Amino acid sequence: MTESPSLGIVVVGASGDLAQKKVIPALFSLYCQDYLPAHFRLYGMARSPFGHESFRKRISENLTCRYMPDAPSCAGRMESFLSRCFYSQGQYDSTDSFLDLYQMMRQEEGRSPVNRIFYMAIPPSVFLDVARALGDSGLVACDDEEVWSRIVVEKPFGRDRQSSDELVGEMQKVFTEEMTYRIDHYLGKEIVQDLMVLRFANLVFEPLWNREYIESVRIILSEPIGVGQRGGYFDGFGIIRDVMQNHLLQILALLAMERPAKYTAGAVRDAKVQLLRQVVPVSLEDLVAGQYVASESGLQQGYLAEHSVPPDSRTPTYAAAVLKVQNPRWAGVPFLLEAGKGLDRKLNEVRIRFRGVPSGWFGDKRVALDANELVIRIQPDEAITLNIMNKVPGLGLDLVRTELNLRYQAAFNITIPEAYECLLLDVLKGDRNLFIRADELEAAWDIFTPVLKDLESKHIVPQPYPFGSRGPAAARDLACRHGLSETV
Ligand SMILES: NC(=O)c1ccc[n+]([C@@H]2O[C@H](COP(=O)([O-])OP(=O)(O)OC[C@H]3O[C@@H](n4cnc5c(N)ncnc54)[C@H](OP(=O)(O)O)[C@@H]3O)[C@@H](O)[C@H]2O)c1
């Protein structure tokens, strides 16, 4: 009988924030729930000087038993997880470093068959170096071998259509498209996955899900913090590349796509690509770019004073863009995407506003009839709310806007899995449904590349807005021009 393969997970950039705070804790959580094979091992690789023990100590600082914190087995689980973690110091562009890693892995694994996941928790500037060195070291199993290799790549996937195509092409020399899992952690969020269920498992929404009944869609990602220590990274990308071209556009695609033929990775991604290709590339007229300045109290500094940000930077920290989908379902419906840092609140939500009912039928009422709105709050405190008009209980006929409210925590009373946990489990199972395919990436870049180029070539100065405010006033004008009332 052939031995079933064990699993080796290589985290490249294991010293970094993403690896330490998200990826490794998510793997620990999967381990605690028995989702990892008994013989899995985790190999950290980075330039920082760690030994196995100091690496384990570093990891342990961020591990918690989220699912059973009081269980006596928790400490034991942590110990056994850590005993499976190893570290190899090296340089990202050095084949020798990856050969050293390979040798260490072989010492631990012997000659038994091993499936491998390579997690690229590194800045995009070193993606290609690592992919080439991995390929040259012979660590990557070919497709036709009895074991598999999969690579997980973090956004940003390039800076525009051209650089993204180049990156994809070069990476594919080592990892085929089938081996590649381009992660957008927003797609791992419970409520984002629920969008498809909400749309396609409930009869009530589908007949209304079109231009006849929906007036506008707004997708908001508002952060009350600035760029902090990540100014150097952020300044090279800006808010449109950082969250709009990926997270918000993915949400739009799930909301607006046609029903996929089946719930399979191929069909869902086909439907998303089809939709993204029907989105008109954003123009400067339909975009407001902003940059935060010091707060009115003076307590919070402006973007230009942040660590590693050039004093003359024109990088937007806020953007509002109206997207138009050219197809029979959505023609004329504005999709307003808004994202910003240094705003007045932490909020990520989708607001689907339905058209109003004809007024006057109830006579001269004190409260104007308000249109229905379906609000899907992704964070904080996941919830789905339907705003409806209701009669105020009591004598007479007074109307009031009320909420049908599904709050996840109260309704399900479970520990909601972290996005990385869910997505890493999918990588392990080979389920690519929630990962970005190359043609999807192309279509997403085609929507934003022209306006990104215009912003740069025309030296557009972003509109200033005070830290802690609701963003630039021009964004509210943009929303009004397209028939939407408020902004973030
Ligand atoms: N943090 C998040 O929550 C998050 C979310 C979404 C996407 N991402 C993406 O995930 C990747 C990793 O994120 P991160 O926050 O962990 O980044 P990070 O902490 O800045 O970098 C990860 C590791 O890469 C190495 N590194 C840093 N700068 C480098 C450089 N200029 N050249 C070569 N190596 C360098 C460092 O390790 P050594 O010095 O030890 O080699 C560092 O510990 C990035 O592509 C980021 O955009 C992160």
Image: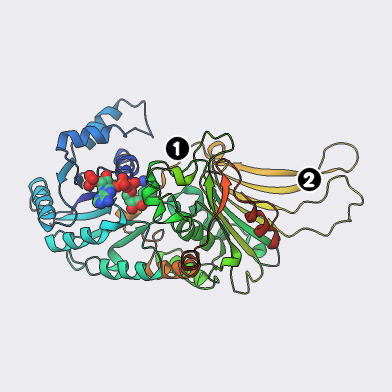
At 43% across and 43% down in the image, what residue appears? 306
Q: Position of residue 237 (x, y in %)?
A: 41, 56
**Mark 2 lies on residue:** 390
Residue type of the residue flagged with mark 1: Thr
Earlier-in-chain disc, 2 versus 1: 2
Which residue type does callout 2 highlight? Answer: Asn
The foreground one among 231 and 75 is: 231
Q: Nearer the viewer, residue 310 or 131?
A: 310
Q: Quadrant of residue 320?
A: bottom right
Q: Residues within 10 Å of mark 2 (few under 14, many from 20)?
A: some
Q: Nearer the viewer, residue 288 or 58?
A: 288
Q: Is residue 223 left or right of residue 208?
A: left
The residue tagged 1 is 415
Q: Residue at x 53, y 47 (%)?
A: 292
**Color scheme of the displayed model:** rainbow
Q: Is residue 333 above or below residue 365?
A: below
Residue farthest front in this picture: 312
> Tag 1's secondary structure?
loop
Q: Residue at x 47, y 48 (%)?
A: 190
